[in-house]
Image: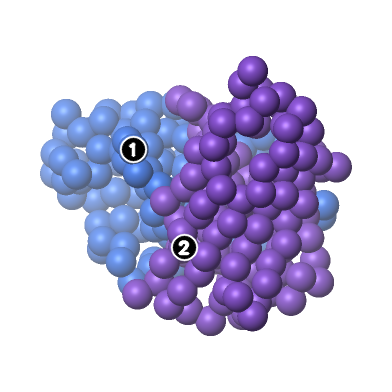
Chain colours: A purple, B blue
Amino acid sequence: EVQLVESGGGLVKPGGSLRLSCAASGFTFSSYSMNWVRQAPGKGLEWVSSITSSSSYIFYADSVKGRFTISRDNAKNSLYLQMNSLRAEDTAVYYCASSHNWNYDYWGQGTLVTVSS
Amino acid sequence: QTVVTQEPSLTVSPGGTVTLTCASSTGAVTSGYYPNWFQQKPGQAPRALIYTTSNKHSWTPARFSGSLLGGKAALTLSGVQPEDEAEYYCLLYYGGAQPWVFGGGTKLTVL
């Protein structure tokens, strides 16, 4: 059974940092691109960042470029999102999702990040 | 800035058919945008339904189908069930530095 389990969310003050993790199981993690997608309260989905299977290519939305860093450890079947200089508008549920050849398939349950003083 | 537009809301009767569309501000949506469709119910994570325009996942009910229609990506639900009431999102691929853009979502009501 495929599982993606996010962790690391919580309450952080503006300007603070947080590191999200996504633990993958049930599929060949090292063969898939991985993605972070977020959803602000009551809003739609927003693509945040993607990383290819071997970390050769990394992409970021303009809204997080220069503040967020995506990475992965294929030996640990894990995906990460280092979030620095957090702002109130970064408050959202953050989902990790796997993709292969433009096909998004599996999603985690999400982890809530709240940026507030 | 690229904008992907979906109908904000649609209503369909049980057993009916409804088509949701996904338009790009850059012009006609083609297969090269690799449209993906997702369903999200309140309090749940999104669930993938359709990839690369019309391909279904193993878990996608047969009543869901994807296509290109009039320069847009389309998701058609035939024989709608009450459990299909949800928010539906499309996702398009643009390549480049920011390859993916989600549509704003369509809230489908089954009434």
The subunit carrying tag 1 is B
Farthest right residue in view? A66
Q: How many marks?
A: 2
What residue lies at 49% left-to-right and 44% top-to-bottom?
A111
- Horizontal side of B77 relative to A15 (left or right) equals left
Binning the other alpha carbons within 10 Å of mark 2 as few (below 14), some (14 to 19) or many (20 upward) gives many
Q: Secondary structure at mark 2?
A: strand
Q: Find the distance from the CA under tag 1 to the CA under tag 2.
A: 17 Å
- Disc 1 residue type? Gly
Q: Position of residue B73 (x, y in %)?
A: 52, 49
Q: Is residue A97 above or below residue A115?
A: below
Residue of label 2: A4
- Disc 2 residue type? Leu
Label 1–label 2 contact, CB within 8 A = no
Q: Is residue B32 above or below residue A56?
A: above
Q: Position of residue A13 (x, y in %)?
A: 67, 25
Residue of label 1: B43
- Horizontal side of A28 relative to B13 (left or right) equals right
Please tell me in which quadrant of the rendered image residue A61 appears.
top right
Q: Are marks 1 and 2 on the same chain?
A: no
Q: Which mark is residue A52?
A: none
Please tell me in which quadrant of the rendered image residue A9 appears.
top right
In the rendered view of the protein, which quadrant contains the N terminus of chain A?
A: bottom left
Q: Position of residue A57 (x, y in %)?
A: 80, 66
What residue lies at 54% left-to-right and 37% top-to-bottom?
A10
Is residue B53 or residue A35 the one in the foreground?
A35
Is residue A69 or residue B64 the one in the foreground?
A69
Q: Is residue B66 above or below residue B109?
A: below
In the rendered view of the protein, which quadrant contains the C terminus of chain A?
A: top right
Res B90 seen here: no
The subunit carrying tag 2 is A
